[in-house]
Image: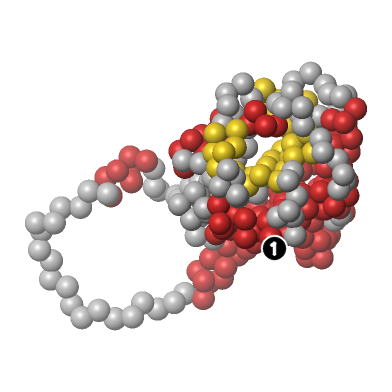
Amino acid sequence: MPTKVPGISPSNLSFLSYVPTAVARNVGPLEPAERDPVQLRRTGLAITAIMLIGGILVTVAYRIKHRADEQDARPHVVQRLTEVFFGRDQNNKAFTTEQLKGKITVFTPLSLREEDRMQQALEIMREMAQKFPDDDRLRFLGITVDPGNDGPEQLKSVLEKLGVADDERWFFVQAEEEAARGYIRHKIRVDFRESIPSPGGPRQRFRSTLVFIDEHLHVLNPAFDLNRAREVEEDAKQMLKNDPGKAEKLGARERINDLEKAVERFYEVLQYIRDGDLKEG
């Protein structure tokens, strides 16, 4: 929610944005402004409050999500991929989403400029592939949102680093940027950008999300943001250390193992999909 400044309204702002330039003023020598220690202290407290509130809001959102899961843990259908997506894979071979029919796919958006943000998602995909090395029903799909930077050669290099370049179940795909971003957003229903609070105002960053697609090309919820799970875990630990009273009220202690719980939930959802046990969307 934007911070309200006393005495400033939208109408005031529109007035202030227009300043006549034809009026000349006599301005004397400029002197350095004196720094008010009280004001600096207030500014520091405000910045701290912004960061703390961000952590609290994330924790509260996670509590709401987990409560919904507790009511019915089965994954549910978001929609079906009726529109075929075309691209080129890491071997520069044609790829279409028709190749996913009859398979269980775990999908994540890619941006090789965001290697740190992708790490958690790619690690669990590799772990899943190693856990079920002979399961040909599984597919591991990534579509880059930055095709100008992430060509087949670069995508193959990532798979080589992961040690799965020879695993034919993996497809890291490049396509025309607008088509790729539109398909991810509107068909797979995954956000690959998110806004987070910061002292300088909201800022955008890459969001690395995991989502399952079943053998009938149904996109399923829940989606998994392991970066967020890790951040919630870290925020909860900090809250317990710095403000135990507030941490107790918000149930922060329940969130100190969120990354581990998210991974457990990931495999639980996979088992539901294998069993064909889905709930209505």
Residue 17, x across and y down, in percent:
27, 49
Residue at the disc numbered 1 = 161
Residue 232, x across and y down, in percent:
75, 53
Mark 1: which amino acid? Answer: Lys
Give the residue at x 52% y 53%. 151
Where 170 falls versus 240 (above or below)?
Answer: above
Placement of the C terminus among the 4 image quadrants? top right
40 or 81, which lies in front? Answer: 81
| Count of numbered circles on the image | 1
Secondary element under disc 1, as helix, strand or loop, is helix
253 or 31, which lies in front? Answer: 253
Placement of the N terminus among the 4 image quadrants? top right
Quarter location, residue 241: bottom right
Q: Is residue 198 visible?
A: no
Residue 135, x across and y down, in percent:
86, 40
Residue 114, x across and y down, in percent:
58, 58
Q: Is residue 158 visible?
A: yes
225 or 144, which lies in front? Answer: 144
198 sits to left or right of 267? left
Give the residue at x 48% y 35%. 179
Give the residue at x 52% y 71%. 40
Where 232 falls versus 27 (above or below)?
Answer: above
115 or 229, which lies in front? Answer: 115
